[in-house]
């Protein structure tokens, strides 16, 4: 299956998806809402086409329409959000229903939104983790496809916990994406 990956920043999950590419999926296009996202260098180094137009003040709907057209022109069948930090409009989401996934750094339904690790530590949770879920119009709310758990240790900071979870994100996301691709 041909996959389009949407990023905004660092791109470590994009790298993990690229390194784990196998028969089930191939990354056909990387889209960024930020033309300076460091993750774009990872895509380019892997020879993957990128779509990252400079912001031109036209607003979200026009940007999304262009991104959607680029994904479809690239033959993309499945969209994976990987650190994509902008809310997608219901219209864009509807066009990829059941075929767009996200990775979120918490054990959903806990801690939707930002600052997930700080919130898990503040709550005194014994475990943190990450979730791959189908994207619906509500933020971090779609059906969970896969999760990985890590312990939270005394003395953990949001940074130490994030690092522990990120290792699991990089293992979980390629597996969950491949499974979804095989089932399409
Ligand atoms: C990850 O922690 C992911 O779960 C969250 O944003 C971060 C993106 O990191 N949605 P990267 O850009 O993949 O390195």
Image: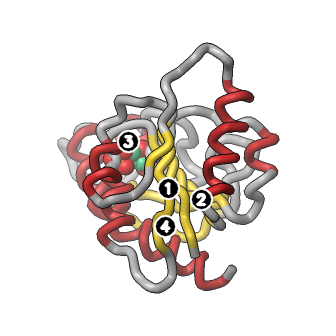
Mark 3–mark 2 CB contact (< 8 Å): no
Mark 1–mark 2 CB contact (< 8 Å): yes
Q: Secondary structure at mark 1?
A: strand
Q: CA distance from mark 1 to mark 2?
A: 7 Å
Task: Indicate which disc, 3 or 2, sits on the residue closer to the N terminus.
Answer: 2
Task: Indicate which disc, 2 or 4, sits on the residue closer to the N terminus.
Answer: 2
Q: CA distance from mark 3 to mark 2?
A: 36 Å
Q: Secondary structure at mark 4?
A: strand
Q: CA distance from mark 1 to mark 4?
A: 26 Å
Instruction: Tell me the residue at 29%/53% (across/down).
Output: 152
Q: Secondary structure at mark 3?
A: helix
Which residue in the protein does label 1 denote?
29
Q: Which mark is residue 147?
A: 4
Q: Position of residue 36 (x, y in %)?
A: 35, 29
Tell me the crowding category of disc 4: few under 14, some 14 to 19, or many 20 or more residues within 10 angstroms, Cα based: many
Mark 1–mark 4 CB contact (< 8 Å): no
Q: CA distance from mark 4 to mark 3?
A: 15 Å
Q: CA distance from mark 1 to mark 3?
A: 30 Å
Q: Nearer the viewer, mark 1 or mark 4?
A: 1
Mark 2–mark 4 CB contact (< 8 Å): no
Q: Secondary structure at mark 2?
A: loop
Which quadrant does the C terminus fall into? bottom right
Q: Nearer the viewer, mark 3 or mark 2?
A: 2
Instruction: Tell me the residue at 21%/47% (across/down).
Output: 154
Q: Which mark is residue 117?
A: 3
Q: Which mark is residue 74?
A: 2
Q: Is residue 124 visible?
A: no
| Colouring scheme applied when the structure was drawn | secondary structure
């Amino acid at each position: 299956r041909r996959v389009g990956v949407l990023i905004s920043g660092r791109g470590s999950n994009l790298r993990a998806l690229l390194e784990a590419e196998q028969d089930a999926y191939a990354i056909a296009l990387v889209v960024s809402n930020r033309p300076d996202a460091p993750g774009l260098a990872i895509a380019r180094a892997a020879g993957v086409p990128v779509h990252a137009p400079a912001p031109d003040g036209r607003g979200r709907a026009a940007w999304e329409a262009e991104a959607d057209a680029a994904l479809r022109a690239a033959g993309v069948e499945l969209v994976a959000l990987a650190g994509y930090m902008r809310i997608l409009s219901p219209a864009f989401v509807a066009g990829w229903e059941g075929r767009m996934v996200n990775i979120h750094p918490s054990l959903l339904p806990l801690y939707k939104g930002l600052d997930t690790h700080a919130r898990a530590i503040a709550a005194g949770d014994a475990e943190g983790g990450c979730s791959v879920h189908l994207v619906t119009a509500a933020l971090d709310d779609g059906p969970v496809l896969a999760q990985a758990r890590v312990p939270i240790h005394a003395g953990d900071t949001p940074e130490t916990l994030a690092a522990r979870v990120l290792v699991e994100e990089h293992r979980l996301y390629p597996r969950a994406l491949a499974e979804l691709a095989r089932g399409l």
